[in-house]
């Protein structure tokens, strides 16, 4: 992803946009830390409304998992500073009332929602940019192993997935070619 106009769109599908609990995970390898960059999102943007979810790299200062509704962002779980040229395992978890962010298998943020979550109703799931009608917040780097779960993964499951990927007999991070 070039940070300017590269993205991958997955056609809108209601199963990727539940009103209830879900988890979204991705491996991200930022090349730059400039501005707000979005590795993965499923957001309907209308005025100030932000129905849906996104994982962001916020101006290089923190990773974020954001949830929204028709009025705007209702939760931002933020933590851990992104690093360039390093693979990072990100997981955003919504359990029905709270947003959780995990970075490299460790919980880095937890925040209760300020209002009821409203899922995206028509925009694609987008890799490499915000999934608004006019893409923005382009990601500059590499993305791999995107997975969506229609339930809240547990902390133990997330830690195990990271551990298997980084310490198993075949170390996942050594298999990724950049």
Image (cartoon, rainbow, N blue to C red):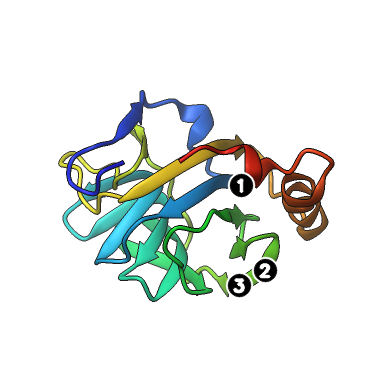
Which residue is rendered at x = 48% and y = 74% of the image? Answer: 81
The residue that label 2 is drawn on is: 107
Residue 42: x percent and y percent? 39, 42
Q: Is residue 98 visible?
A: no
Residue 3 versus residue 97 in the image, above or below: above
Q: Secondary structure at mark 2?
A: strand
Q: Mark 2: few, some, or many residues within 10 Å (few <14, many ≥20)?
A: some
The front one of 148 and 2 is 2
Q: Which mark is residue 23?
A: 1
Name which quarter of the figure residue 101 lies in. Answer: bottom right
Q: Which mark is residue 69?
A: none
The residue that label 3 is drawn on is: 110
Q: Mark 3: few, some, or many residues within 10 Å (few <14, many ≥20)?
A: some
Q: Secondary structure at mark 3?
A: strand
Residue 102 versus residue 132 in the image, above or below: below
Name which quarter of the figure residue 169 lies in. Answer: top right
Which residue is rendered at x = 56% and y = 38% of the image? Answer: 176
- Image check: 20 left or right of 140? right
What is the quadrant of the C terminus in the image?
top left
Check contact, mark 3 vs mark 2: CB within 8 A: yes
The front one of 70 and 143 is 143
| Disc 3/disc 2 C-alpha distance (Å) | 8 Å
Mark before the other along the chain sequence, 1 or 3: 1
What is the quadrant of the N terminus in the image?
top left
Q: Secondary structure at mark 1?
A: strand
Check contact, mark 1 vs mark 2: CB within 8 A: no
């Amino acid at each position: 992803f070039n940070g300017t106009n590269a993205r991958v769109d997955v056609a809108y599908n209601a199963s990727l946009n539940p009103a209830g609990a879900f988890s979204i995970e991705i491996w991200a390898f930022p090349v730059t830390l400039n501005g707000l960059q979005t590795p993965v999102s499923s957001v309907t943007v209308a005025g100030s409304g932000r129905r849906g979810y996104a994982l962001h790299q916020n101006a290089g200062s923190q990773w974020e998992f954001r949830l929204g509704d028709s009025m705007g962002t209702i939760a931002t779980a933020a933590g851990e500073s992104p690093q360039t040229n390093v693979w990072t395992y990100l997981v955003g978890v919504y359990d029905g009332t709270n947003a959780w962010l995990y970075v490299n298998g460790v919980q880095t943020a937890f925040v209760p929602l300020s209002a009821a979550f409203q899922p995206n109703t028509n925009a694609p799931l987008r890799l490499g940019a915000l999934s608004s009608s006019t893409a923005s917040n382009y990601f500059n780097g590499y993305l791999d192993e995107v997975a969506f779960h229609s339930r809240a993964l547990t902390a133990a499951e997330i830690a195990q997935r990271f551990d298997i990927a980084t310490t198993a007999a075949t170390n996942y991070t050594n298999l990724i070619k950049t």
